[in-house]
Image (cartoon, rainbow, N blue to C red):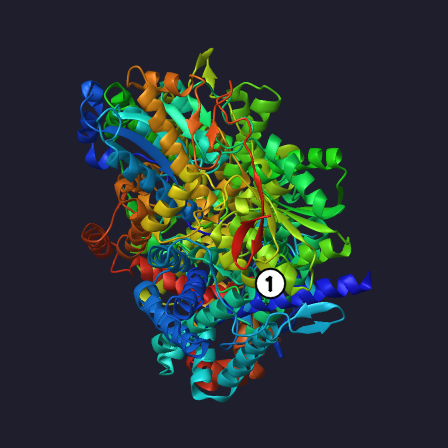
C-alpha cells in the first residue's frame, strides 16, 4: 500500500508542478503591480493552442514553435498591459481585475474562432513515460516542467536580488509612489512584469499542454483559477510561494481525488484557498498582507453620484415596463423576465459592493443556494413556491454569512478572492452532495410557480412576477441606502478606521450588507430555478458571479435602479447579438472592456463636466477645499500607520 | 466551466430599453407567416456554437448541412426548399428557454432540432410542448427526456438498452472491471444501467469513479484503479476525455484492455490518444464497414463535403435527425406544426444511417437498435 | 486625586526592532485636560492609537473608569465612551457634514446589546437595525437632529451653513471641525484629539482654542496631542512630555515649561526665553 501512496504523491508532485508554473506568472504580476491578472489563464491557453498550430498544421519543429510561443505571448502580455492596465493605473484593483477578465474573454473567443473549438492533441517533444520510480512511471517532460519552474525561480531570484532592474521591481512592488519619486520608471517595470509573466504563461501552455496532451481554447479559465489558487496558497507576490503552493495543491488534489473521486477536485482547490485566506491570509510563504487599505471602489467607481429619479418618472417607467406584455412578443417577455432575474441578482452587489464597498466575486454561491433551496423544497417536499421563495432568501443569507464570516477583516483583493472561493465552494458542495442536490444530474422538471392557484408558466406571467419582485427589491434597497444604515455603510466603505472610532464595528456592517445582499440573491435564485426549470452545479460558476458585478457596475454601483439598465445591456444585448452567433461572446468581452475603460462609474450616474462644475461651485463656497480624490489619497497614506496590525 | 460568461450571453431583454417599443411592434405582427405555404420550409436548430460544447455544435453542423444540401438537391419537400435557422444556446440550460421561445414566436418554423445534451434540451421542452412545436431531440439521452409531452421526440437509444449490453461486452474481455464514468446526468444515468448489466452478466466491479469531463489529469484515479487489479477498464466517456484517460493509462504502464461506450466512436478519439488508442474496443451503432449501400454512400458524401473520412457519432445523429424530420414532413397530410407532429408520431419507420430502419415507440423514442463490436486497429475503427 | 477616568499603565509598542512606545503610564482624572507633547516620532500618536484601540499594545494596560479596555477593538472602546479625532482629519468625503456628524451617533446611539459581542449572534441586533431602517426610519431622528445641530452650532458660522455640503468640498479646517463634532456628538466621557489644529492658521487655531476651553468649562475630559505649545499651555491641566517613546517629564504647564530635560529634548531655549519674559 505504501507503494501506492508514493505513486499518488509523485503524481501529485508532477501535476502540482504544472500549477506552479502557471502560478509563478500570477504571483509575479501581483507582486510587482498589485494586480490580479484574470487574463493569465487565457494567455496560457493561447500559448498551448499556438504551440499546437505551429507543430501540427504548420508542421514546424518544437524548437521553433516553443520560442515563437514565448515571443508571441510575451508581446501579448505587453498588449494586455497597454490596453487594460496602463489606462487604469490610477483606478482601484477591481477595475483592472475586470479589465483583465474582459481581455480573457476576448482572447478565449478569438482563439476559439481562429483554432476552432475542438480538443486537439499536442505532441510532446519529450517522452512522458520513460522513467520509473518505485513503480510510478513518469517522463523527461515532467522533469523539464519541474526544471523550468526551478530555473524560473532561480532566474527571478537573481533578477530581483542582483540587478538594477530587479531592485527597481522590488521597490515598485513595495511602494509605487516612493519608487516613482526615486526615479524608477514604474510603468516600464510593470509592463516588463506583464511581459515576463505572460511569456512564462505561454511557456506553461506549451509544457502543460504537452503533459496533458489534450489542448483546446477552453482550457484557460480553469487553469488560470487553479494557478491563482496555488499562488494565493503559497503567498501572493512570492515566487517561491507560487511553487510551494502549486505543489501543495497538486499533492492535496492527487490524494483527495484518488480517495474520493474526481468531483472533490474543485472542493479541494477552493476549499484550501478559502482556508488559507481565513487562517493565514498571506499564504504559506508570503507576508501577511500589509493592510495598506487599498480601496477597491474608492473614488473610481464612487466618482459618479447616482442620478436621482423623480418619483413620477419612476412610476411612469415602471408602468411602461408593466404594460409591455400587452404589446410584446412572448420571446421578448421570456427574455425580459430573465433580465429582471439577473437584475435582481445584481442588486445584491449594489448592497455589498456599492453601499459597503466590498467587491464580492462569489455571489453565484448565494444564487445557487437560493435556487437549490427552492427547487428541493418544491420538488421533494411539495412546498408552495412562495414559501420556498422565502426559504431561499433565508438559506442563502445564513449559509453565505457563515461561509464568509472570517472574510471581513480582510481587505481589497483578498475580500474578492475569499468570496470568489466561497462561491466556488458552494457550487463544489452542490456537486459533492448528490443525496441532497442530485449532484451532477442536477434537479430537473422544476414546476412553474402558481399564484392563487393560477400557473405562472406563461411568458407574460413570469415577466410580471419577476418585474414586480424586482421593483419592490429596488425600492427596498434604495430605502436602505438612504437610511441610517446607508450612512453607516458609507462610513465603513470610505474609512474603516474612522468608522470604528465612531463606535461602528466595520466587520458587522460589511457582513450585514453582504447578508442582505445574499437574501436578494437567494430570491433571485428561486426565480431562476422556476424560470430555467433545470439546475445543475455548473450553472453557478465564477463567470456568473463576475456577470453580477459587471451588471451592478455598469448600472452605477451605488444606484439601485442602475441594475435594471445594467442587466438590460449585459444580458439583453448579447441577445441582440444572437444573429452573430459565433462572435457573440467576443463582443461581450469588448463591451465589458470598453465599459471599464470608458465609463467605469456606470451609466446611472452623472460625472464629468456636471460633477466638475458642481465641485467647483461647492469648492468655492467651502473655502477652496481639496477634491474628492485629494481627500481620498490623504486618507490612504495614513491608513497604514493607523491601522491595527 | 472554462469558457467565460457562457451565461452572459444569456438571455435577455432585447432591445428593451434601448430600442424601446420599436422592437415590440415588429415582433408583434408575427401572424402573417401563417399562409406562407409556398416559401421555403423552415426548421430551427438549437445548438452550441460557442462555449464549452462548441465542438459538438461543429459536428452537428457537418451532419445537418450535408443532409440539407442533399434534401434540397433532391427537390426539397413537396417541391419546397428547406431552410435551417440556427440559434446558439451554448448548450446552456439558462439560455435554452429564450431560444425556444424565439422559435415558437417565429411561426414559419415547423420543428426544432436539438439541443446538445439533456440539460439544455429539457430546459426548453416545456415551452415547445406548451406551444405545440415539435422538439426533435437527437442528442439527449436522459430517460425522461420525452416526458413533457407529445411534441417532444428523442432518437438517442435509451441507456437502458445500451449500457447493459456494454457490460456484457466488457465481460467478454475480462471478469473484473474498473469503470470510469462522466460526472454528468448522462454518465450517471448510463452507469446506473451499466451496474444492472453487471449483475446480469456476472461482471465484477472492482473500482468505479465519476469524473469531470473537463479534468486534464486522471493519473490519481488511474492509480487507484490500478491498485484494484481490474481485468478490463470501462469508459463511459466522450471521445476527448476518453482518449485522455486511455493515453494517461498507457503512460502509467497500465496495459489492461479498455472498452468504451458508443460515444467514443469518433476519429477524434484516435487522433487524441494516438498509439494508445490501439486495441480499444467499443460497441457502435455505426461502422464504416457496414455494407449497407446507404451507409457507404453517406460515408463518401460526408468525405466529399467535409474532407473527413470518419464522421463522428454526433454528425451522423444530426444528419439522421434532419432526414427523419424531412421524412415526417413528406408524410404529413398538412404541413403545419400539428400536422408534422402527427406525421412523426404515426408509427411508420424512418430510414437512418445510424440505426438503419427504425421506428419510434409510444414514448416517441427509439427503443433499440443493433450495435457492432469495433476495435481500433492501425488507427481506424474496424469491425471485430 | 479621585479615581482616574482613564488609567494607562506601562503600555509598550514595538515595530520590528524599534520601540515607539516604551512603558508609558499616566492617568486622566474626570474633567481634566491632559496633553502629550514631544518631538516628531516620540510616540505621541502611537500612544493615542493604543488608548483608542486602533493599535494593539505589546504590554501594559488601559482602563476606562476602572474597566479594563486593553485589547478591545476601537468600536468597543468608542462605545464605552472614548472617542477620538485623527491627525489628518478623517471625514467621510461622500457624506454631508450633517451626516458625518450623525455617524458619531450611529455607532454610539445604538442600544447596547450584549449580543453584539458574541460572534454567532451579532447578526440579531444587526437584523433589528435593518428592519428599523426600513420600517421605522424616523425613530429617534428628532433627538439626533438636536444633538447634531448643537454640535454644528458649537463652531459658530463655520459648519452650520455648510451642513448639507459633501465633506470632500470642505476646507481643511472645516474637516477638522466636522471631525471634532462627530467625536463629541454622543457625549463621550473622554475626548481624544490628535493635533486638532494641525494645518490651521493663527486665527483658526485661536478659534478652536476658544471652543476647546468652552468644552473644558463644561467639564469635558480630554486627552490631547498637539504641537502648538501656546494652545497646550493655555488649555492643559497637566502635560506629559514624550521622547523616544518614554515619558521624560510630567506636570502642570508651568512645571513642564521650566524642566531642563524638556528644554533640552524639545522646547529649545528660545521658546523658554520667549515665554518666561512675557
Looking at the rendering, which quadrant does residue A624 occupy? bottom left
Q: Is residue A585 left or right of residue B24?
A: right
Residue C192 position in % (x across, y down): 52, 58
Report whether residue A468 is seen.
Answer: no
Q: Nearer the viewer, residue B259 or A354?
A: B259
Residue A267 position in % (x across, y down): 62, 50
Q: Nearer the viewer, residue A584 or A280?
A: A584
Looking at the rendering, which quadrant does residue A555 occupy? top left
Q: Residue at x 20, y 21 (%)?
A: B37
- Judged from the image, the secondary structure of the residue bearing numbered disc 1 is helix
Query: Which quadrant is home to the N terminus of chain A?
Result: bottom right
Q: Is residue A566 left or right of residue B191?
A: left
Residue B351 position in % (x across, y down): 42, 30
Count of marks overlaid on the render: 1
Q: Nearer the viewer, residue C175 or A90?
A: A90
Q: Is residue A595 left or right of residue C100?
A: left
| Outermost right residue | A1
**Relative to B320, does residue A219 appear above or below in the rendering?**
below
Query: Which quadrant is home to the C terminus of chain A?
Result: bottom right
User: What residue is pinned by disc 1?
Assistant: A233
Residue C34 position in % (x across, y down): 55, 63
Q: Is residue A537 left or right of residue B319?
A: right
Q: Nearer the viewer, residue A177 or A449?
A: A449
Q: Residue at x 49, y 41 (%)?
A: A539
**Relative to C119, does residue C173 appear above or below in the rendering?**
below
Amino acid at each position: 500500500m505504501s507503494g501506492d501512496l508514493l505513486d499518488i504523491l509523485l503524481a501529485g508532485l508532477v501535476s502540482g508542478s504544472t500549477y506552479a508554473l502557471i502560478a509563478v506568472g500570477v504571483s509575479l504580476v501581483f507582486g510587482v503591480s498589485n494586480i490580479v491578472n484574470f487574463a493569465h489563464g487565457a494567455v496560457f491557453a493561447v500559448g498551448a493552442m499556438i504551440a499546437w498550430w505551429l507543430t501540427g498544421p504548420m508542421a514546424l519543429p518544437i524548437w521553433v514553435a516553443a520560442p515563437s510561443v514565448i515571443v508571441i505571448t510575451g508581446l501579448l502580455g505587453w498588449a494586455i498591459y497597454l490596453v487594460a492596465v496602463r489606462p487604469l493605473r490610477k483606478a482601484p484593483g477591481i477595475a483592472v481585475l475586470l479589465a483583465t477578465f474582459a481581455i480573457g474573454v476576448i482572447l478565449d473567443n478569438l482563439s476559439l474562432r481562429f483554432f476552432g473549438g475542438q480538443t486537439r492533441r499536442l505532441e510532446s517533444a519529450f517522452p512522458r513515460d520513460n522513467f520509473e520510480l518505485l513503480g510510478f512511471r513518469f517522463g523527461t517532460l515532467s522533469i523539464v516542467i519541474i526544471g523550468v519552474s526551478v530555473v524560473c525561480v532561480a532566474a527571478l531570484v537573481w533578477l530581483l536580488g542582483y540587478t538594477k532592474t530587479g531592485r527597481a521591481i522590488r521597490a515598485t512592488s513595495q511602494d509605487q509612489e516612493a519608487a516613482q519619486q526615486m526615479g524608477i520608471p514604474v510603468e516600464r517595470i510593470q509592463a516588463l512584469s506583464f511581459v515576463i509573466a505572460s511569456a512564462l504563461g505561454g511557456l506553461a501552455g506549451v509544457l502543460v499542454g504537452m503533459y496533458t496532451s489534450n489542448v483546446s481554447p477552453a482550457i484557460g479559465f480553469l487553469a488560470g483559477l487553479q494557478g491563482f489558487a496555488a499562488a494565493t496558497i503559497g503567498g501572493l507576490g512570492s515566487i517561491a510561494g507560487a511553487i510551494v503552493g502549486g505543489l501543495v495543491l497538486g499533492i492535496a488534489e492527487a490524494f483527495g481525488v484518488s480517495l474520493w473521486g474526481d468531483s472533490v477536485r474543485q472542493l479541494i482547490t477552493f476549499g484550501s484557498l478559502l482556508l488559507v485566506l481565513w487562517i493565514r491570509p498571506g499564504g504559506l510563504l508570503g507576508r501577511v498582507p500589509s493592510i495598506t487599505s487599498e480601496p477597491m471602489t474608492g473614488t473610481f467607481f464612487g466618482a459618479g453620484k447616482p442620478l436621482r429619479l423623480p418619483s413620477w418618472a419612476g412610476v411612469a417607467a415602471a408602468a411602461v415596463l408593466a404594460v409591455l406584455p400587452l404589446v410584446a412578443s412572448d420571446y421578448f417577455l421570456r427574455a425580459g423576465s430573465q433580465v429582471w432575474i439577473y437584475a435582481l441578482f445584481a442588486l445584491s452587489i449594489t448592497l455589498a459592493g456599492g453601499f459597503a464597498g466590498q467587491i464580492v466575486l462569489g455571489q453565484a454561491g448565494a444564487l445557487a443556494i437560493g435556487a437549490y433551496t427552492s427547487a428541493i423544497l418544491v420538488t421533494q417536499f411539495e412546498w408552495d413556491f412562495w414559501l420556498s421563495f422565502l426559504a431561499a432568501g433565508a438559506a442563502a443569507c445564513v449559509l453565505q454569512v457563515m461561509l464568509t464570516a472570517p472574510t471581513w477583516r480582510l481587505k481589497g483583493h483578498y475580500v474578492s478572492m475569499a468570496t470568489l472561493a466561497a462561491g466556488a465552494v458552494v457550487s463544489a458542495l452542490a456537486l459533492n452532495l448528490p443525496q441532497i442536490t442530485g449532484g451532477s444530474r442536477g434537479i430537473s422538471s422544476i414546476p412553474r410557480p402558481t399564484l392563487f392557484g393560477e400557473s405562472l408558466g406563461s411568458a407574460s406571467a413570469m415577466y410580471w412576477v419577476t418585474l414586480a419582485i424586482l421593483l419592490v427589491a429596488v425600492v427596498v434597497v434604495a430605502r436602505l441606502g438612504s437610511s441610517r444604515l446607508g450612512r453607516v455603510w458609507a462610513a465603513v466603505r470610505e474609512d474603516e478606521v474612522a468608522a470604528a472610532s465612531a463606535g461602528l464595528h466595520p466587520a458587522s456592517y460589511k457582513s450585514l450588507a453582504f447578508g442582505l445582499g445574499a437574501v436578494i440573491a437567494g430570491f433571485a435564485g428561486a426565480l431562476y430555478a422556476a424560470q430555467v426549470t433545470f439546475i445543475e452545479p455548473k450553472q453557478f460558476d465564477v463567470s456568473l458571479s463576475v456577470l453580477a458585478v459587471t451588471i451592478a457596475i455598469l448600472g452605477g454601483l451605488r444606484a439601485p435602479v442602475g441594475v435594471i439598465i445594467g442587466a438590460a445591456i449585459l444580458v439583453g444585448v448579447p441577445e441582440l447579438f444572437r444573429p452573430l452567433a459565433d462572435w457573440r461572446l467576443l463582443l461581450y468581452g469588448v463591451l465589458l472592456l470598453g465599459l471599464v475603460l470608458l465609463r467605469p462609474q456606470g451609466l446611472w450616474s452623472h460625472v464629468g463636466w456636471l460633477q466638475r462644475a458642481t465641485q467647483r461651485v461647492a469648492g468655492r463656497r467651502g473655502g477652496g477645499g481639496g477634491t474628492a480624490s485629494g481627500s481620498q489619497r490623504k486618507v490612504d497614506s495614513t491608513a497604514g500607520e493607523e491601522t491595527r496590525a | 466551466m472554462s469558457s467565460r460568461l457562457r451565461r452572459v450571453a444569456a438571455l435577455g431583454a432585447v432591445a428593451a430599453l434601448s430600442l424601446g417599443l420599436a422592437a415590440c411592434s415588429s415582433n408583434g405582427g408575427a401572424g402573417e407567416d401563417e399562409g406562407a405555404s409556398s416559401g421555403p420550409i423552415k426548421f430551427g436548430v438549437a445548438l452550441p456554437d460557442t462555449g464549452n460544447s462548441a465542438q459538438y455544435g461543429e459536428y452537428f453542423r457537418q451532419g445537418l448541412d450535408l443532409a440539407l444540401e442533399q434534401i434540397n438537391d433532391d427537390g426539397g419537400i413537396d417541391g419546397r426548399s428547406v431552410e435551417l435557422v440556427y440559434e446558439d444556446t451554448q448548450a446552456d440550460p439558462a439560455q435554452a428557454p429564450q431560444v425556444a421561445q424565439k422559435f415558437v414566436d417565429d411561426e414559419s418554423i415547423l420543428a426544432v432540432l436539438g439541443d446538445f445534451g439533456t440539460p439544455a434540451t429539457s430546459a426548453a421542452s416545456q415551452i415547445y410542448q406548451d406551444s405545440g412545436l415539435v422538439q426533435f431531440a437527437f442528442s439527449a439521452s436522459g430517460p425522461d427526456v420525452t416526458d413533457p409531452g407529445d411534441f417532444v421526440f428523442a432518437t438517442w437509444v435509451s441507456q437502458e438498452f445500451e449500457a447493459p449490453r456494454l457490460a456484457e461486452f466488457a465481460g467478454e474481455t475480462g471478469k473484473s472491471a474498473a469503470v470510469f464514468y462522466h460526472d454528468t446526468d448522462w454518465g450517471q444515468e448510463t452507469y446506473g444501467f451499466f451496474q444492472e448489466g453487471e449483475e446480469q452478466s456476472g461482471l465484477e466491479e472492482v473500482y468505479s469513479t465519476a469524473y469531470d469531463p473537463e479534468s486534464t489529469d486522471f493519473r490519481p484515479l488511474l492509480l487507484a484503479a490500478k491498485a484494484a487489479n481490474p481485468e478490463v477498464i470501462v469508459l463511459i466517456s466522450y471521445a476527448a476525455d476518453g482518449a485522455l484517460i486511455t493515453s494517461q493509462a498507457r503512460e502509467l504502464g497500465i496495459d489492461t484492455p479498455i472498452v468504451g461506450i458508443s460515444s467514443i466512436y469518433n476519429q477524434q478519439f484516435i487522433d487524441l490518444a494516438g498509439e494508445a488508442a490501439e486495441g480499444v474496443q467499443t460497441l457502435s451503432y455505426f461502422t464504416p464497414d457496414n455494407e449497407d449501400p446507404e451507409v457507404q454512400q453517406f460515408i463518401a458524401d460526408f468525405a466529399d463535403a467535409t474532407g473527413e473520412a470518419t464522421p463522428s457519432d454526433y454528425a451522423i445523429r444530426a444528419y439522421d435527425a434532419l432526414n427523419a424530420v424531412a421524412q415526417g414532413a413528406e408524410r404529413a397530410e398538412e404541413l403545419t406544426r400539428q400536422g408534422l407532429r402527427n406525421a412523426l408520431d404515426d408509427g411508420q419507420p424512418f430510414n437512418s444511417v445510424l440505426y438503419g430502419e427504425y421506428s419510434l415507440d409510444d414514448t416517441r423514442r427509439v427503443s433499440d437498435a443493433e450495435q457492432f463490436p469495433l476495435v481500433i486497429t492501425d488507427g481506424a475503427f474496424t469491425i471485430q | 486625586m479621585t479615581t482616574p477616568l482613564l488609567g494607562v499603565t506601562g503600555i509598550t509598542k514595538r515595530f520590528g526592532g524599534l520601540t515607539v512606545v516604551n512603558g508609558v503610564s499616566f492617568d486622566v482624572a474626570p474633567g481634566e485636560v491632559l496633553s502629550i507633547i514631544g518631538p516628531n516620532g516620540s510616540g505621541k500618536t502611537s500612544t493615542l492609537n493604543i488608548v483608542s484601540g486602533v493599535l494593539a499594545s505589546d504590554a501594559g494596560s488601559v482602563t476606562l473608569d476602572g474597566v479594563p479596555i486593553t485589547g478591545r477593538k476601537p468600536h468597543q472602546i468608542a462605545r464605552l465612551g472614548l472617542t477620538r479625532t485623527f491627525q489628518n482629519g478623517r471625514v467621510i468625503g461622500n457624506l454631508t457634514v450633517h451626516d458625518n456628524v450623525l455617524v458619531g451617533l450611529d455607532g454610539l446611539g445604538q442600544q447596547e446589546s450584549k449580543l453584539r459581542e458574541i460572534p454567532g449572534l451579532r447578526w440579531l441586533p444587526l437584523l433589528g437595525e435593518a428592519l428599523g431602517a426600513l420600517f421605522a426610519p424616523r425613530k429617534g431622528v428628532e433627538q439626533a437632529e438636536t444633538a447634531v445641530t448643537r454640535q454644528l452650532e458649537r463652531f459658530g458660522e463655520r459648519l452650520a451653513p455648510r451642513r448639507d455640503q459633501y465633506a470632500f468640498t470642505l476646507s481643511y479646517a472645516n474637516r477638522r471641525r466636522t471631525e471634532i463634532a462627530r467625536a463629541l456628538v454622543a457625549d463621550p466621557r473622554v475626548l481624544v484629539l490628535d493635533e486638532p489644529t494641525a494645518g490651521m492658521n493663527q486665527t483658526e487655531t485661536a478659534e478652536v482654542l476658544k471652543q476647546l476651553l468652552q468644552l473644558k468649562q463644561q467639564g469635558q475630559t480630554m486627552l490631547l496631542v498637539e504641537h502648538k505649545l501656546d494652545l497646550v499651555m493655555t488649555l492643559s491641566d497637566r502635560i506629559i512630555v514624550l521622547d523616544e517613546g518614554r515619558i521624560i517629564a510630567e506636570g502642570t504647564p508651568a512645571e513642564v515649561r521650566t524642566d531642563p530635560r524638556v528644554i533640552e529634548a524639545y522646547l529649545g531655549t528660545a521658546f523658554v526665553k520667549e515665554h518666561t519674559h512675557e
